Amino acid sequence: SYVSAWHTLAPAFGSVTGYELLTLSGGHFDSRDYFCVIGDVQRPATVQPGGTSVTCWTPHWTRPAGLVQIELLVDGIAVHRDASGQFEFLAGPPTQFEFLAG
């Protein structure tokens, strides 16, 4: 059987207010329960049709802005990652950063 793995995280940054939809792209995601671990916060992940990506929402971040590590778990075990897996929480409301994505 194939092993789940991910290699791309998008977007790479978002507001500390949270509720950014993260997409972890890779392959061989199946019907098991996946969870994103964002810093030390675990959030449920949704496998997208075709099994090549999963999505999860960032939490409202109450700690200082900055880089956090992203991990993807299935059955409590980290899914193999071919990426840095870093997401940057930026201080301020989301509208402040829209020009950066342009």
Image: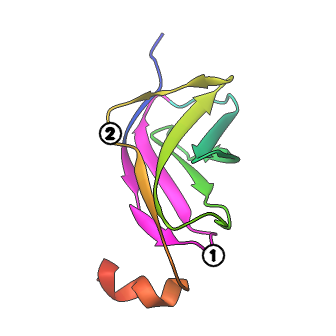
The picture places residue 32, in percent across and down from the top left corner, at: 68, 28
- Please say whether residue 13 is one of the residues in the magenta stretch: yes
Q: Nearer the viewer, mark 1 or mark 2?
A: 1
**Residue at the spot x=38%, y=61% of the render?**
12
The picture places residue 49, in percent across and down from the top left corner, at: 55, 45
Q: CA distance from mark 1 to mark 2?
A: 25 Å
Dividing the picture into quadrants, the one containing residue 36 is top right
Q: Is residue 64 above or below residue 43?
A: below
Q: Is residue 47 above or below residue 81?
A: below
Image side of residue 43 versus residue 52, left or right? right
**Label 2 neighbour load within 10 Å: few <14, some 14-19, many 20+:** few
State the quadrant of the C terminus.
Answer: bottom left
Do labels 1 and 2 touch, CB within 8 Å?
A: no
Q: Which secondary structure dominates the residues rendered in magenta?
A: strand
Say which element carries label 1: loop
**Residue at the spot x=32%, y=33% of the render?**
82
Which span of residues is magenta-colored?
Answer: 8-28
Give the total of numbered labels.
2
1 or 2: tag closer to the N-terminus: 1
**Residue at the spot x=67%, y=24% of the render?**
76
The picture places residue 84, in percent across and down from the top left corner, at: 33, 42
Image side of residue 15 versus residue 7, left or right? right
Q: Which mark is residue 94?
A: none
* Amino acid type, residue under disc 2 in the picture: Ala
- Please say whether residue 63 is one of the residues in the magenta stretch: no
* Amino acid type, residue under disc 1 in the picture: Thr
The picture places residue 78, in percent across and down from the top left corner, at: 54, 26
Q: Which mark is residue 83?
A: 2
Q: Which residue is mark 1?
A: 17
Residue 69 or 44: which is nearer the viewer?
69
Image side of residue 21 versus residue 41, left or right? left
